[in-house]
Amino acid sequence: MSVTVSRSVMIEAPFDEVLAVVRDVGSQQTWWPGMLASEVLETDGHGRAVRARIVNDVKVVKDEFETVYEHPDDGLTWRLSGSSMAQRSQEGSLLLEPDDDATTATLSLTVATTLPLPKLVQRKVVTDSVTGALEGLKRHCAS
C-alpha cells in the first residue's frame, strides 16, 4: 500500500536559482526538514548527483536509504534504489515552472512503507514531509 502526496508553492526567486538549489542534493538537508544527511555517492558528467545516501528522521522512525536521480530540464526526479528499513519503495519529483521573476515548485512523493502503520498515519507523515520541504525550499531561496 502506497501513499502519494503532491503540493505546490510559489517561490519569489528566478527559475535558475531555484533549480540550482533543488539539484544540489548534497545540501538538501539544509532546507528539507527531517533530512539528517545527504551524501552524494555518484555524479554524472555535469557534476549532478545520480546516486545519494539519505538519512531521514520522519518522527515515526529514522531511516537510511539510497536514491537514484534524474535531471529533467525542469527539476529533479528520484526513486529508491532498493528497500530500506522503513520503505518498500519511494518515487518523487520536484518540478519547477518559471513565472516572471518567481518560480512555482511542485513536489510529488509516493512512498510505500514497510511499517505497520494505519494509512491515515502514513498519509500524515508523507504530507508533513512534502509540506515541510516546500516551506524549507521557499525560505532557503528567499535568503
Image (spheres, grey):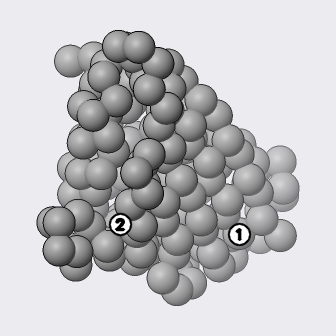
Where residue 75 sits: x, y (%)?
42, 48
Q: Tell me: residue 61, above or below residue 19.
A: below
Q: Position of residue 93 (x, y in %)?
A: 54, 53
Q: Which mark is residue 112?
A: 1
Q: Is residue 18 above or below residue 25?
A: above
The numbered disc on residue 54 is 2
Tell me which numbered mark, 2 or 1, is placed earlier along the sequence.
2
| Vertical side of 60 occupied by 47: above or below | below
Quadrant in the rendering for residue 74:
top left
Q: Is residue 125 visible?
A: no
- List the single residue furthest toward the bottom: 82
Q: Nearer the viewer, residue 104 or 86?
A: 104
Tell me if mark 1 has few (under 14), some (14-19) or many (20+) residues whose alpha carbon lies within 10 angstroms of its own.
some
Identify the secondary structure beneath mark 2.
Answer: strand
* Residue at x-position 70% and y-position 45%: 5
Q: Residue at x 23, y 64 (%)?
A: 48
Vertical comparison of 142 with 27: above or below: above
Q: Identify which amino acid the numbered label 2 is placed on.
A: Ile
